Amino acid sequence: MKKLVAICSFLLVGFFAEAQSDSTSKVAFKIGAFYNSGLNYYGRTDSLRSSGFFPVAELWLNKNFYLNAAPVFVINSQSNFDYAGTVATAGYRFTDDKFSGNISFVKPFYESGTQLVQSALKAQFSTLFTWSNKVININAGGDVKFSDKVDLGASGGIDHIFRKEFPDRSVLVLDPSLYVHAGTQQFTKTYYKQSSFLFFPGVEQTVTENVRKFNILSYEFSMPVVFAKGKFQLIAIPAYVIPQNLITVQDRPDLSERGREMFYATVGVKLSL
């Protein structure tokens, strides 16, 4: 999830199959439904390791400007099918033979009390640019995340698209991708400091300070697969994420980040109306 806000990143995967046909500027409306087997935020998870279901509605004002909204329903051992909130996105996409990009603003509307790791996010501005060639595509992006603080993020990756067209005009696209995600982390650090003056014995003091570091957050390999025929798309995105630099607080697991290497998948369908 991954990329834009993790739970929304997969919504743009259909571009691989649509790029050849979206040449008009007319208004278009699309709907879809997706299931994610392991909700995570750069490999960080809630204590219940929730999965999620996302119905999606997209409005394309033309081939470049779009709006979408995705209600989030959480599934875990304590929540059968609980509504956690809605994630809305406004964006601009452009493509040509060698360069493409996506610029978006994401606004989540989470329910109070939701346990999702990403629920602290209040808004996010993201960019992702791709240089395409016959050997390998090079991707680079950045973001600004707004919560009670402001965090900066960056991502870089490579991918190679395999596209197969069939006689019935259906299209199969595979896109093996490797990404590294980085960003600022803000946390509180407490340590002991020994102070002394001349020949007088030292006094041990507890010092607490706020720390802000720019670290690698995760490595991620994914294999988006899109099958498209006419107005119908079938999408599957298996992925393996390796979180990095998890924040831990000694003797306080409730304040520490939970995360581990994990395989998860997003699957769904999309229909153009």
Image (tube, rainbow, N blue to C red):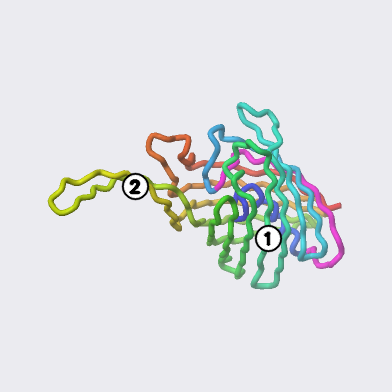
**Which quarter of the figure has residue 171?**
bottom right
- Give the number of the disc on residue 90: none
Give amino acid for label 1.
Answer: Ser
Q: Is residue 3 left or right of residue 219?
A: right
Q: Is residue 131 above or below residue 12?
A: below
- Determine the residue positioned at 42% across, 53% down: 211
Choose between 142 and 241: the one closer to the eye.
Answer: 142
Q: Is residue 245 left or right of residue 27?
A: left
Location of residue 248 in the rendering, given as x and y in whole percent from the top left corner: 42, 42
Query: Looking at the image, do the residues carrying marks 2 and 1 touch, with CB atoms under 8 Å apart?
Result: no
Which residue is situated farthest in the left direction here?
199
How many marks overall?
2
Q: CA distance from mark 2 to mark 1?
A: 41 Å
Going from the N terminus, do you reach mark 2 or mark 1 first?
1
- Determine the residue positioned at 16% across, 45% down: 201
- Give the number of the disc on residue 104: 1
Choose between 133 and 146: the one closer to the eye.
Answer: 146
Q: Is residue 206 left or right of residue 115?
A: left
Give the residues in magenta: 21-41
Q: Secondary structure at mark 1?
A: strand
The verdict on residue 172 being magenta is no
Choose between 91 and 18: the one closer to the eye.
Answer: 91
- Determine the residue positioned at 68% across, 55% down: 106
Location of residue 19 in the rendering, given as x and y in whole percent from the top left corner: 74, 63
What residue is shown with label 2?
207
Give amino acid for label 2.
Answer: Val
* Other residues around mark 1 within 10 Å, as few (<14) / some (14–19) / many (≥20): many
Eye-nearest disc, 2 or 1 = 2
Q: Secondary structure at mark 2?
A: strand
